[in-house]
Image: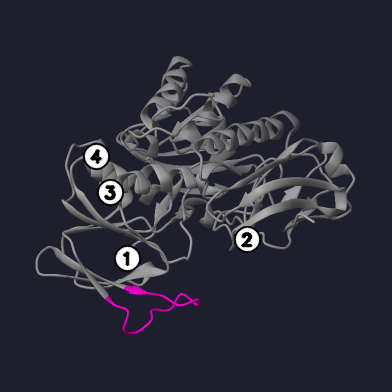
C-alpha cells in the first residue's frame, strides 16, 4: 500500500466498484478498501433476477450483474484491499484527507486528495421497529438470511414470517418458497406495499403468499426457538389496535424492515446529515459538506435499483476527478433543491448550472395521474403514478438549472 492517492474509495460493492473503475478510466491513482473478505457487496448474495435493466439493458441476477464489475475492476489492476477496516477519515486540509486503516498486514495511515464513501447501508433490527418478546433463535435480518442461503447454503428455517414488504422482503418470500419453506405471511406496517409492483406480483401473488397490510408483528414468542408471532392491526397513526391480535405459528422471523445509510466513518469526519434520507447533504458533484469527500450508493440515499447505485458511483468519481484536476471544486452559485408537495426526500440538495444533474426522490404517499413540477424553471414531467416504494429519477439540464434563482422547488401535483 502506497502512502498517498488521488482518491480512496471506501466500499467494494456496486457503488464503490463503479466509482473506482470510473476514477481509473479518468486517469486517477485509486485505492479501494472493502471491509468484507470479498468484493461485490450485497449483489453477491442475490441470485434472483431484476438487476441491470437500466445499466446493461439486460435482466441479470445480482451475481451476474456484479460479476461484470468485479471482472472489469480486476482487469484494470486497481489496487485494493479486502478485510480492510477504515477506522476514521480526518480532513487535515483542503487537499489532504488521512485515513486510518486496519488490514491483515497491520495498521496504516493513507493520505488522499479525495475520498469516495460507498460503504452502503445497515438493516434495521427488531428493537428499532418495536418488536417485543423472547430473545430466541430463529430471528434474522433479510441480509443474514440471504447470506446463509446463497453464500453458505444453509436454510434459516421452514415456517417463515417476514416483517416488511419492501423489495428485499418480497424477494425473500419467493426465495424461501422456491427452496421449499412455507412463508406464512408478509407483514407490512403501511397500508400499501413497500416494494415495486412487479415484485408484489412476481414474489407474492404468483405464489399465493398472504400480505398483511396495516399490520405489525408486535411480539415474538418461543422457548429456545421461535414458535409463534403475534400480529396486530394498526390504525391510521400506525398504532396497534387492541383486540385485533392474531397468532401465526412459525419457526423463523425475517426482518426486512428497511435500511439505514451506514455513515459511521464519515459522520466522525463532520459531514452534514439530512434527516430525511439519513445520508449526507450533497451537491451536484455528490460532494458532502466536507470538501473532497464524496458519497454514492446506499450510503447517500436508499435506492430501489442497483443501476442507480452504479450511476451514483460513477458520478462521484467524476466529482472527485474535477476536484483533483482543478485543485478543488470551483466556487459556484448553488441552487437549493426544496421539497414541495408530496416529496419526502430528494438528492442532491444543492444544484449547479455547470453540469446536468440527476435528481433522485421519493414521495410521501401514492398518487395517480400526477405532474412532477419544478415551478422556478418551468419544467414538468407527467407520471401515471408515484409510490413511496419507487424512486423518482429525473435529469435537470444545466440550462434549466441556470434559469433558477436561489432555489428550485420539486413538487408532485395533480394533472389538471
Of badges 4 and 1, nearer the viewer stands 4
> Which residue is identified by label 4?
178
Q: Which residue occupies the extreme bottom position in the image?
A: 242
The answer for how far apart the CA atoms under marks 3 and 1 are is 14 Å
Q: Badge 3: how crowded within 10 Å, few (<14), some, or many (20+)?
A: some
Q: Residue drawn 26% across and 47% down?
A: 145
Residue 187's disc number: none
Of badges 3 and 2, nearer the viewer stands 2
Quadrant in the picture for residue 84: top left
Of badges 2 and 4, nearer the viewer stands 4
The colour mode here is one colour
The answer for how far apart the CA atoms under marks 2 and 4 are is 35 Å
Specify the segment rendered in magenta: 232-245
Considering only vertical position in the picture, is 177 above or below 345? above
Q: Is residue 401 left or right of residue 28?
A: right
Q: Decide if residue 41 is in sight here.
A: no
The answer for how far apart the CA atoms under marks 4 and 1 are is 26 Å
> Which residue is identified by label 3?
144
The answer for how far apart the CA atoms under marks 2 and 1 are is 24 Å
Q: In this view, does 253 lie to the left or right of 404?
A: left
Quarter the C terminus occupies: bottom right
> Which residue is identified by label 1?
126
Q: Which of marks 3 and 1 is nearer the N terminus?
A: 1
* Residue 311 picture location, percent across and down: 59, 34
Of badges 3 and 4, nearer the viewer stands 4
Q: Which of marks 3 and 2 is nearer the N terminus?
A: 3
Q: Decide if residue 174 is in sight here.
A: yes
Disc 4, SS: helix
> Which residue is identified by label 2?
344
Q: Which of marks 3 and 4 is nearer the N terminus?
A: 3
Quadrant in the picture for residue 245: bottom left
Amino acid at each position: 500500500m502506497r502512502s498517498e492517492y488521488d482518491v480512496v474509495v471506501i466500499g467494494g460493492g456496486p457503488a464503490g466498484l463503479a466509482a473506482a473503475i470510473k476514477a481509473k478510466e479518468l486517469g486517477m491513482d485509486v485505492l479501494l478498501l472493502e471491509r468484507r473478505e470479498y468484493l461485490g457487496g450485497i449483489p453477491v448474495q442475490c441470485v434472483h433476477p431484476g438487476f441491470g435493466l437500466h445499466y446493461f439493458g439486460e435482466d441479470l441476477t445480482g451475481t451476474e450483474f456484479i460479476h461484470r464489475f468485479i471482472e472489469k475492476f480486476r482487469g484494470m489492476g486497481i489496487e485494493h484491499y479486502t478485510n480492510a477496516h477504515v477506522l476514521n477519515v480526518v480532513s487535515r486540509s483542503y487537499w489532504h484527507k488521512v485515513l486510518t486503516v486496519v488490514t491483515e498486514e497491520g495498521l496504516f495511515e493513507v493520505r488522499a486528495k479525495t475520498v469516495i464513501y460507498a460503504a452502503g447501508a445497515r438493516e434495521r433490527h427488531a428493537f428499532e421497529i418495536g418488536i417485543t418478546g423472547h430473545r430466541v433463535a430463529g430471528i434474522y435480518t433479510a441480509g443474514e438470511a440471504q447470506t446463509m442461503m446463497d453464500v453458505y447454503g444453509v436454510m434459516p428455517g421452514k415456517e417463515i414470517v417476514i416483517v416488511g414488504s419492501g423489495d428485499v422482503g418480497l424477494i425473500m418470500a419467493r426465495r424461501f418458497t422456491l427452496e421449499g419453506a412455507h412463508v406464512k405471511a408478509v407483514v407490512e406496517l403501511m397500508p400499501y406495499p413497500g416494494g415495486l409492483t412487479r415484485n408484489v406480483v412476481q414474489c407474492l401473488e404468483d405464489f399465493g403468499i398472504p400480505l398483511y397490510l396495516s399490520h405489525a408483528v408486535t411480539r415474538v414468542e418461543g422457548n429456545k426457538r421461535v414458535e409463534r408471532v403475534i400480529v396486530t392491526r394498526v390504525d391510521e397513526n400506525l398504532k396497534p389496535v387492541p383486540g385485533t391480535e392474531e397468532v401465526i405459528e412459525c419457526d423463523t422471523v425475517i426482518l426486512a424492515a428497511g435500511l439505514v445509510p451506514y455513515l459511521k466513518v464519515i459522520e466522525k469526519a463532520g459531514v452534514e446529515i439530512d434527516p430525511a434520507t439519513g445520508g449526507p447533504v450533497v451537491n451536484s458533484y455528490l460532494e458532502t459538506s466536507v470538501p473532497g469527500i464524496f458519497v454514492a450508493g446506499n450510503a447517500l440515499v436508499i435506492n430501489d435499483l442497483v443501476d442507480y447505485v452504479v450511476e451514483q458511483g460513477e458520478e462521484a468519481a467524476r466529482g472527485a476527478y474535477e476536484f483533483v484536476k482543478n485543485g478543488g471544486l470551483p466556487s459556484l452559485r448553488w441552487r437549493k433543491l426544496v421539497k414541495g408537495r408530496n416529496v419526502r426526500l430528494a438528492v442532491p440538495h444543492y444544484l449547479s448550472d455547470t453540469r446536468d444533474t440527476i435528481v433522485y426522490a421519493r414521495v410521501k404517499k401514492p398518487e395517480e395521474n400526477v405532474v412532477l413540477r419544478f415551478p422556478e424553471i418551468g419544467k414538468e414531467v407527467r407520471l401515471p403514478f408515484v409510490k413511496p416504494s419507487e424512486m423518482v429519477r429525473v435529469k435537470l439540464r444545466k440550462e434549466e438549472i441556470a434559469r433558477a434563482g436561489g432555489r428550485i422547488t420539486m413538487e408532485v401535483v395533480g394533472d389538471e
